[in-house]
Image (cartoon, rainbow, N blue to C red):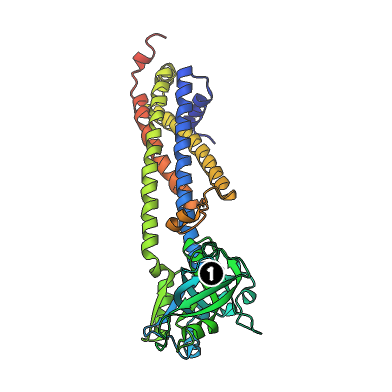
Amino acid sequence: MTSLPLEVAVRYLKSRPSRLVSSVSVLSMAGIALGVAALVVAMGLMSGYRTEIREKLIGANAQVVVFPMMPGGDADPAAVEARLRKVPRVRAVAPVIYQTGIAASATTPDGEDAVLKGIDPGAEGKVSELDVYLPDAAKAIAPASSGSPASVAIGFELARKLDVREGDSISLSVADNAGGHFGPRTERFRVGRIFRTNFSEYDREWVFLDRGDLRRLARMAGEANVFEIKLDTTKDTEAASAAIRVAAGEAFSVSDWRSMNGGLFSALAIQQTTLFIVIGLIVAVSTFNIIATLVMTVQEKKRDIGVLTTLGAEPGFFSRVFLALGALIGGLGVAGGIIFGVLICWTMTRFRLLSFPPGVAEIYFVSYIPFLVRLQDIAAIVGFAAIAILLAAWIPARRASRIDIADALRYE
């Protein structure tokens, strides 16, 4: 059953007020709607950006990385892998080799900096989302056979810089880990696949090749210098990392995706909070129109207030009426703003309107940003707008409760 103050407020909202009051009411709702829509889009942008970076970091890498404290890698990765697999939350382990090097081609003889990652495609697919951006990796990354060079997979930005396509030849150069060779060791490979992760750092530098080929090229003593681990969930990664550290032993160091990128995600969280406050001020300012609307409505409804007072209405009744009226006007604006903002976010994501060229992608780390509308962001926006609207409506509502009945009925 509708309360009487709310019923009166609804009747006031549906009535035909003066043209000025009507115009100010429309401006009030439009201002709040635009402010809320801007806040929804801003939060969607920041949430989407953080999620995109997190998913790319976790998808292209493993959730936890274990590496020996001494250089050269581990000569017996099977023993380490067996200990790591016994940790309760560990779901998969993959030994890999990381090496920095240079990739060159016939059109780019000076080469480009590259990060070479030696993997076993089957094992790597269990710890990262390799199959998402590099399907059928075993065919793209294959050792040499029958006089044919080994094939590798390279990021599309690196391929663009080298001006190569699938099937072309490239040269990979790495330092000699054995120390007996003067200068870098170089070998020719065939481009078996060009992949795209949409994470700029990986797409412009990464080269995947067979772990045995990279070990032979770099003349490493150990069979792996990194162990990548997939957990059952990304929640409470710190506790899982601590258990893995104990299992690995003192000769190994353990890092997880949060610790390796903690500064980045902290900065993004601060940016999102700051953006919410700044654009939230726009919403707060837009609620000032509600004050003007309600003040003029109070003046227009003086006669009604006087008549209802003579019938026994208490002063607090009118406060509740105009608080409800302000809430209705503001609520319609908030609802319209949320719908408009969500529609903008959907359009921006559906048609990938916020995509970056290579140079800009290097700054933002990703080549495309989706707009992610989260329920907790919507709840925070609605809560903030509700407080601002009720504070704005409180002033004219208080004024309505203090109208003198004699003044209200003087000319009736």
Does residue 364 lie above or below 135 as drawn? above
Identified at 40% across, 27% down, the residue is 318
Image spot of residue 307 (x, y percent): 43, 17
| Residue matched to label 1 | 105
How many numbered circles are shown? 1
Q: Residue 266 appears in which quarter of the rendering?
A: bottom left
Image spot of residue 1 (x, y percent): 54, 36
The single residue placed furthest to the right in the displayed view is 146
Q: Nearer the viewer, residue 324 or 139?
A: 139
Image spot of residue 4 (x, y percent): 49, 30
Identified at 48% across, 66% down, the residue is 57
Image spot of residue 118 (x, y percent): 52, 79
Q: Is residue 180 left or right of residue 157?
A: left
Q: Residue 20 appears in which quarter of the rendering?
A: top left
The single residue placed furthest to the top in the displayed view is 411
- Kind of element beneath mark 1: loop
Picture quarter with the C terminus: top left
Identified at 37% across, 33% down, the residue is 392
Q: Would residue 317 be visible to someone looking at this image?
A: no
Q: Is residue 125 left or right of residue 306?
A: right
Does residue 240 lie above or below 17 as drawn? below
Q: Would residue 295 be visible to someone looking at this image?
A: yes
Does residue 400 lie above or below 392 as drawn? above
Q: Nearer the viewer, residue 175 or 395?
A: 175
Q: Nearer the viewer, residue 282 or 311?
A: 282
Categorize mark 1 by other alpha carbons within 10 Å: few (<14), some (14-19), many (20+): many
Q: Amino acid at mark 1?
A: Ser
Identified at 49% across, 75% down, the residue is 116
